[in-house]
Amino acid sequence: MADHAVERLKGKTLLQHAHTPYMDMLARMGRNGRLQTVPEGFHPGSEVANATILGYDMTKCYEGRGPLEAASIGYDMQLDDLAMRCNIITVKDGKVKNHHGGHLKTEEGAMLINYLNEHLGNDHVKFIPGIQYRHLLVINGGKKGVECAPPHDHPGELWESLLPNLSPHNNTANLIIELVKRSQELLMKHPFNIGRIKQGKDPANSIWPWGGGYRPQMQTFAEMFPQVKRGDVISAVDLIRGIGKYAGLKNIIVPGATGMANTNYEGKAEAALNALREDDFVFLHVEASDEAGHDGDLNLKLQTIEDLDSRIIGPIYEEVKKWKEPVCIAVLPDHPTPVELRTHLAEPVPFLIWHPGIEADEVQQFDEVSAVSGNFGMLKLNQFILNFMKE
């Protein structure tokens, strides 16, 4: 939900403009700061930022999005498997129109990816369904290091220029190019897309494999922080669930959690509260503002921020403030996705930490500008979780 100043909002950021009484109250009662979530030299992907927030050193355990998707889906990677995140996207006039195939429903995405597996899959290539437009491509014996540009970072650009280069020495790159082109031929002929075009909707007409890697080696969260004997992760996004699985956190699946603006906010809040009654730590992730940022939809992103405040943070705070056992709450984005740029940035994000009895700083509201004055100052990488665990 972090963003830049927007002229349409009279020079305010979305957090400054939005009505967020609970975030602002927690900022006033708690302590604030900014956090650099992306290590130098790393792409500002959600897998990097969220794992860093949890305290993982990306220079030691980063393997890309694909293995995290595999863990979430439940695919048991073999040592020689290359797992890649496989979007179903929309291409039009030779360009990437969107990274989500026109906001596919999970059952639609599964139908298309299974169709591709029937026609393109073999002993070495597998397409495995995930959630909505987010799926998995596994290449047995594939080589890591093939650079496929993340599609959400390149809307409106020529898709062929974003593919890896053909190489006589890299069969994986050549295979990926072939799979993308053959997927476009197959998907355009699928009755689902023929119907979408007739209805004036975006066809889901291309795969986009990226973020490939091997099975990562990670400590569990409890090994890093022994005070957390049991922890949970709540998210609609496969890669977040994958981080949670490798971290030893229990994945809590909330019915109606979509990763979009229509997600089940109340269900996530209730699930978090139920988990906190039994367990020590909950990582609650909401994707809606990021998707709205990628779509460049200012009004929708504002709505997602206000929904987060009123439908998740508010109910959680109102409940836990009654409990005898104190609960520590942190609120922060993983990275900015400015609506006018529609892509991730490796810029610092604001954060707040509150618990009963914490000594408040002078910050009066939660936003990118106010956080500069927070007592925590500028933290980097795992410094956030280390401070959070001290509270």
Image (cartoon, rainbow, N blue to C red):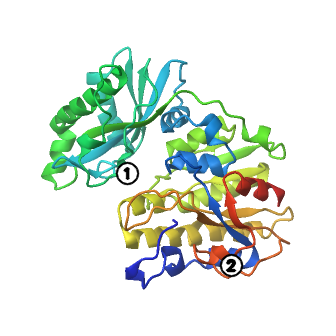
Whether residue 124 is visible, yes or no, is yes
Whether residue 117 is visible, yes or no, is no
Residue 175 drawn at (x, y percent): 31, 24
- State left or right for residue 43 relative to residue 58: left
State the residue position of label 2: 25
Q: Quadrant of residue 249?
A: top right
Classed neighbour count for the residue bearing mark 2: other residues with Cα under 10 Å, few (<14), some (14–19), many (≥20): some
Classed neighbour count for the residue bearing mark 1: other residues with Cα under 10 Å, few (<14), some (14–19), many (≥20): some
**Which residue occupies 58% across, 64% down?**
349
Q: Quick one: label 1 or label 2, which is nearer the N terminus?
A: 2
State the residue position of label 1: 152
Instruction: Check disc 2 and give the amino acid type.
Output: Met
**Which residue occupies 46% across, 61% down?**
337
Q: Which of 83 and 283 is in front in this view?
A: 83
Give above or below for 227 relative to 245: below
What is the secondary structure assignment of the residue under circle 1? helix
Q: Which of 239 and 42 is in front in this view?
A: 42
**Which residue occupies 59% across, 56% down?**
268
